[in-house]
Amino acid sequence: MKYIGIDYHKQYFVATIMNEQGEIIRRDKASTDRSSIRHYFKHADLSGGVKAVMEACYGWEYFYDEASELVDELIMAHPLKTRLIAEARIKTDTIDSETLAHLLRADLIPRAYAPDLETRGQKNLLRYRSSLVAMKVRIKNIIHSVLTRNHIEDQPFTSLSDKFGKRGLSYLRAVSLKGNDTVILNEYLDLLEETDKKIKEAEKRIRTLCREDKICTLLRSIPGIGPILAVTIRYEIDNIERFMSAGKLCSYAGLVPSTYSSGNRTYQGKITKQGNKWLRWAMIEAAQKAPAKDLWLQGFYQRISRNGKKIARVAVARKLLEIIYRMWKEEKPYYKKGTVALPVV
């Protein structure tokens, strides 16, 4: 068996090939274009089986997809945990690739999950929709700044709770501002309209995906989880079998409290917020709506809210994720009895 440590960069990668005794067979630097990647793995002596490792980094997907077909196994290393194991004062690409090869040979690689191409595609659709929503918010804020510098005083408009509703947009299209601001306002309104159109198109595709997926249907049975959140949760978790317990899943979402120990004293602080930020966002969003739609969760929220509403919201988010873990494992929906929704048992 041979072991390859790969230090990947956008324009090139450095690879160190090592045998089972830890002896370096060869070390190379190659370009990251497709033909160079194939040429390297084709001409490197990989007889007798080969395992390779690379760190999860920006743009890892391209190289992973290309190289994984050319070796027996390509492992993704968790970059933060790898640094903790192999911290070095002298850091170069060559040393990094050699260190990764040594850790792989000793079976000390802390693995990071590499989702398949289909899962990444669905995640990209969700990210695309999120970026459009952020863009929409930014455009609205800019429009507000245009209106502020013109100090709009018309009562029918200023009294509107939603300045971008049907009545608000009708007024904005007709208002006359000083200088170039009328043209600027209308251009931003055009951008807002186009962005909103793209958001609706993306959400239509997400809803179609939700209807066709069995796990998404299960997730939608939970109060507070609609199509967008269901698809987000489903593909951010992807494979429930990679989590040994509900606690591990909550830790992955960063919804567990940080812990500090010194001597005989142990303190628990705020949630770690380490892990999958998209899954954590989805669970917090669901936790804001769920207590209003479910009497059992409402009672749970009210008991915790004595310590603070934010603490209660996080507690509900974690409780929902624990329920999701069990539902997914047992393939049972969240069901209601009378007017009270109950977690699966």
Image (tube, rainbow, N blue to C red):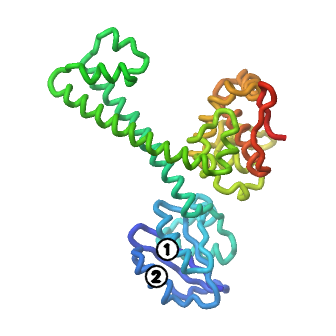
Whichever of callouts 1 and 2 sits on the residue coming sooner in the sequence is 2
Q: Residue furthest left?
A: 179
Quadrant containing the C terminus is top right
Question: Is residue 10 rendered to the left or right of residue 154?
Answer: right
Disc 1 and disc 2 in contact, CB within 8 angstroms: yes
Q: Position of residue 220 (x, y in %)?
A: 66, 40
- Using residue 132 as the reference point, say whether residue 301 is left or right of it: right
Q: How many numbered circles are shown?
A: 2
Q: Which residue is mark 2?
A: 38
Residue drawn 29% across the image and 35% down it: 190
Let me know if residue 100 appears in the view.
no
> What amino acid is labelled 2 in the image?
Arg
**Which residue is farthest top?**
155
Nearest to the observer: residue 64 or residue 217: 217
Q: Does residue 139 show up? A: yes
Q: Which residue is mark 1?
A: 66
